[in-house]
Image (cartoon, rainbow, N blue to C red):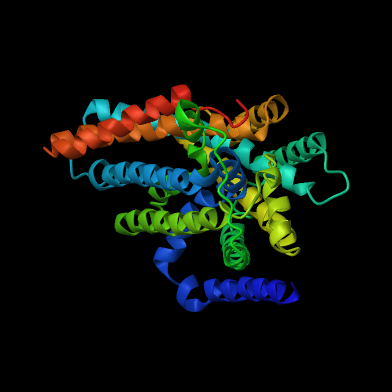
Amino acid sequence: MFLLNLTIILTVLITALLLWSPRVHGSITWQAMTTPLASIIGSGFLVLGPILNSEYGKYAPLVMAVLCIGAYLYGAAIRNNMATVENGSIHAHRFITKLEIASSWSLGFAYIVSVAYYLNLFGAFGVSLTSVNEPYLGKLLTSAIFIVILFVGWTRGFKSLEHMEYVSVTAKLAIIAGLLVGLAVYFYGRAADGGLIFNVPERTGWSAITLAFGLVVTVQGFETSRYLGADYDLKTRIRSMQWSQWVSTAIYMSYILLMAFVFEKSELKLTETAIVDMMAVVSPILPVILVAAALAAQFSAAVADTSGSGGLITELSANRLTPRMAYFLLTLTGLFLTWSANVFEIISYASRAFAIYYSLQASIAAITSWKQRRYWTSLGFATLTLLGVLIVIFGQSVES
């Protein structure tokens, strides 16, 4: 066990050093990938493993693949819009302009819900390794962080905190690398002993599909590349979205494949912090570094989305709603969700909110593709629009 812990620690340190090396840190594409990666593999990484293993059993990797493919296709719709509407390569009809405005409003609302999702996970993980690991104390911690974020946003703005993003992404990726190494060693040991486990899924049929609908937010975040126009050109932003989806897909698939066949059904307790107990079986050091990564990741993601929603709402309202008012609205909504719903329900709400945005973006892509006489492509984007509507209507939470 000592050798495994040492290997995990060395993997974390080496990965962190590589990510901070001048060649990587200085890469414009990598810098542009930081924001979407921070969102895609943030909270989703913490909850997807336990949820997929518990609910889908041996089919967890298949469901993970479907989620990643779906996210990539919606990313293709947004990239299409970046290359056509945003770039001015096709004349934006008034109806398309209205759809863009509607999608921006829906994204602003989705950010508000996603902040509640991030900070509720922050609260749950914040008390997970303490002697006072109680749900209501996690909610109190979440509420306190909401107040802190409101205070900072109201008095100083978030510029002083935005530098945390690269630090938190680097730490998160380094810890994920260590976690994957630990899981790989554990998986190999199970496989060598003939002890791989193929759990029967808890959900099948329509129930399994609607639960997958409710997990869309766990692979969300790639769309943030579109809104980095102040720092990067169009080509870099499109590439950053595509590459961040490739990297996150590779990480997610490796993670789920290594987790899906090594835990007994009795070990799969479906709680917000189930990943902590599961990783304790693999190595005693993993829960500690995983919680540290979780706290940094959730806080930085919450700050990024709070800042993003404030700026977006102010712009869309033609300055009738100031960023301060947007932060206040976000805090009230977040506190309401914190004390009226559990994390899994908030995940479902956030998935539906983002599905509205993705559906509207897919509809824009369908219209512009039709105008360009790319009829089969238009049909594909129209299908994604319909899928988004189905997700909004039928997406369910884990405990439903």
Furthest-left residue in this view: 373
Q: What residue is rendered at 69% in x and 61% in y? A: 282
Q: What residue is rendered at 78% in x and 41% in y? A: 141
**Residue 201, quarter of the rendered image:** top right
- Give the x, y percent position of residue 395: 49, 27
- Give the x, y percent position of residue 308: 52, 42
- Give the x, y percent position of residue 130: 84, 50
Furthest-front residue in this view: 194
Q: Is residue 143 above or below residue 30?
A: above
**Residue 259, quarter of the rendered image:** bottom right
Please indicate whether residue 29 sits to the left or right of residue 284 in the image: left
Residue 317 visible in the picture: no
- Give the x, y percent position of residue 94: 24, 27
Q: Is residue 191 above or below residue 52?
A: below
Residue 266 visible in the picture: yes
Q: What residue is rendered at 21% in x and 32% in y? A: 367
Q: What residue is rendered at 36% in x and 47% in y? A: 72
Furthest-right residue in this view: 131
Please indicate whether residue 21 sits to the left or right of residue 383 in the image: right
Q: Which one is in front, 367 or 304?
A: 367
Q: Which one is in front, 242 or 54?
A: 54
